Image: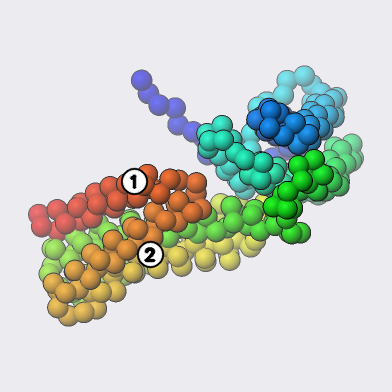
Amino acid sequence: MPTATRPLAKSFSDLSEQEILALAISSEDDDARAYAGFANALMDTYPASAKVFVEMAEEEHEHRRWLTDLYRKKFGDFIPLIRRSDINGFVRHKPAWTIGKLNIEEMRQRAEVIELENYRFYKQASERSTDPQIKKLLDRLAEAEKGHESLAGRLADKHVTADAKIEEGEARRRLFLLQVIQPGLVGLMDGSVSTLAPLFAAAFATGDTWETFLVGSAASVGAGISMGLAEGLSDDGKLTGRGHPLIRGTAAGVMTAVGGLGHALPYLIPDFATATWIAIVIVFLELWAISWIRYRYMDTPFLKAAFQIAVGGFLVFLTGVLIGNS
């Protein structure tokens, strides 16, 4: 059976006002469902905290009704389904049901990131809007998101624990981690693994350390340029607050190049056997580091991450060795 190909995500700047309203409607519905799910999970153990999430879900439903009424007034009854995942610039959150049982702190953190994202979305959408009624509603929703009482405070009143409170700005730092640090780490993983095949193919084909170093350096720098361009051109950073695309692209590109140069530098050593064994040890350390990064920042169990990276890295390494010896 043929597999459907997912269409390319659309840029936020290319959305019409009709599409912006449709996106906002589906987003409010998704958020309401998420809050309702949190409330259901907490109902038995923390009923008062569950009530907070019920109230938040009701607020999101009310926002959706405002948006739907205005949409129908402007564009008719048919509302296309446009989700955040269809638009460049939004954080790719894992659905809550796919990552196991969340505790109350993790639910609070997820909700705060959602509120911050929604505020930025409505502010950017309002600035682009030319219709007075649409602009007025988007401003109203932005203020509603901005004016939400601190979720940490609301839960602290209901579920009194010291660790339920956070310092001001933590949600922004967490969003920065999701949108800037993790893409950079993906670049590091790409550079470390993708350059194994050309490096070791050159090593075993030529037996020359200098030529191997040149091939490894070229592969690393080329991968860095490619990853940097991909990250820098992915979105302009206005919607998500990810920062200037030049800065993000440079960071991703540099980390990709560093990941590849790590096992290319040993070939500056003239002795081929010594250089190769050192490079292999460095590869092992790189794969271990990547497994830890996936475990620490990407919610992947360490053993699962290690197995996936080890198998993938070994296959790429083996490909290079076989091609080099052919």
Which sits in the foreground, 170 or 256? 170
Q: Looking at the picture, how far across and down is residue 78, in whole percent?
A: 73, 20
Let me know if residue 229 appears in the view.
Answer: no
> Relative to 281, does residue 326 appear above or below in the rendering?
above
Identify residue type, mark 2.
Gly
> Relative to 268, does residue 136 appear above or below in the rendering?
above
The N terminus appears in which quarter of the rendering?
Answer: top left
The C terminus appears in which quarter of the rendering?
Answer: bottom left
Q: Looking at the picture, how far across and down is residue 96, in whole percent?
A: 59, 35
Which sits in the foreground, 93 or 163? 163
Circle 2 SS class? helix
Q: Looking at the picture, how far across and down is residue 201, in whole percent?
A: 19, 60
> Relative to 94, does residue 64 appear above or below in the rendering?
above
Which sits in the foreground, 85 or 298? 298
- Identify the residue shown where x is 34% and y is 69%: 261
Q: Within the image, what quadrant is residue 85 found in?
A: top right
Q: Looking at the picture, how far across and down is residue 56, in whole percent?
A: 79, 35
Which sits in the foreground, 54 or 25? 54
- Identify the residue shown where x is 64% and y is 54%: 174
Is 138 situated left or right of 296 in this image?
Answer: right
- Identify the residue shown where x is 73% and y is 53%: 162
State the count of labels. Answer: 2
Circle 1 SS class? helix
Crowdedness of circle 1 by 10 Å Cα count: few (<14), some, many (20+)?
some
Identify residue type, mark 1.
Gln
Sequence-first tag of 2 and 1: 2
Q: Residue furthest bottom?
A: 270
What residue is shown with label 2? 259
Q: Which residue lies furthest to the left in this view?
A: 326
Let me know if residue 61 appears in the view.
Answer: yes
What residue is shown with label 1? 308
